[in-house]
Amino acid sequence: MKKVSVCFVCLGNICRSPTAEAVMRHLVEEAGLTECIDVDSAGTGDWHIGEAPDARAQRAGGRRGYDLAPLRARQIEADDFQRFDFVLAMDDANLSALEDVCPAGAREKVRLLMEFAPQLDARVVADPYFGGDAGFETVLDQCETACAGLLAALRTRLGD
C-alpha cells in the first residue's frame, strides 16, 4: 500500500500549523485514508515546544468540529525532511526558514500550503496570533480550502 506523509509548518506551532493538521486529519479520516496518509505539524521556532495550541485556535476549531487539544508544539527537525513527502509552510518567512535548514536533496518537498488553494488568491495563511478571534476563523477558512485541495492532490499521488 502506498503511503504519503505531510507536515504543516508555521512559526511556533500553536496557531496555523496545528489548525491545518487538525483539518487535514479530519478530511483524511472522512475519506477513509488514515492508513495511507500521515499528518503532523511543527514550528520553525522553539518558543512553544510541548505547549498545546493557542486557546483561541482550539475554540475556533472546536466550533467547526476539530479537536486541537491533544496536539503539542514541536520544532521542525532535520529528519523531518526525510520522514515527510510534503513540508508545507504557512507563509514566506517560514518557507525561507525551512529552505535554510532543508537538505539539498529534499527541497522539492518544501512548499506553501496555499499552493493547494489557488481559488482563494492568497499566497499565505494569515497569522492570527496578534489579532482577534476573526483571524482564527480566517485561518480555518484558508486551511479547509487548502487541505481539501491537498487531499485531492494526494489522492492522485496514491492512485485513489
Image (cartoon, helix red, strand yellow):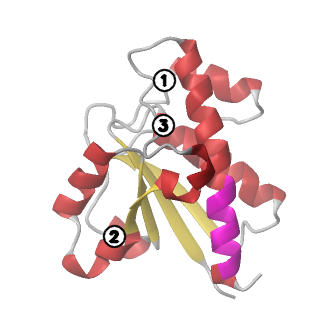
Name the amino acid type tagged 1: Asp
Left or right, 77 with reference to 155? left
Residue 140: say if magenta. Answer: no
Q: In the image, which is nearer the foreground, mark 3 or mark 2?
A: 3
Task: Indicate the quadrant where residue 134 lies.
Answer: top right
Cα distance, mark 3 to mark 1? Answer: 10 Å
Q: Is 63 rendered above or below residue 43? A: above
Please, what secondary structure does the residue beneath circle 3 have? Answer: helix
Lower sequence index among marks 1 and 2: 1
Can you give x and y, in whole percent of width and height, for residue 20 in the image?
A: 56, 45
Q: Disc 2 marks which residue? A: 81
Q: Are marks 3 and 2 in contact (CB under 8 Å)?
A: no
Task: Indicate the quadrant where residue 22 lies.
Answer: top right
Residue 159 visible, this angle: yes
Q: Disc 1 marks which residue? A: 54
Residue stretch in magenta: 148-156
Query: Quick one: 148 or 13, which is closer to the camera?
Result: 148
Which SS type dominates the magenta stretch?
Answer: helix
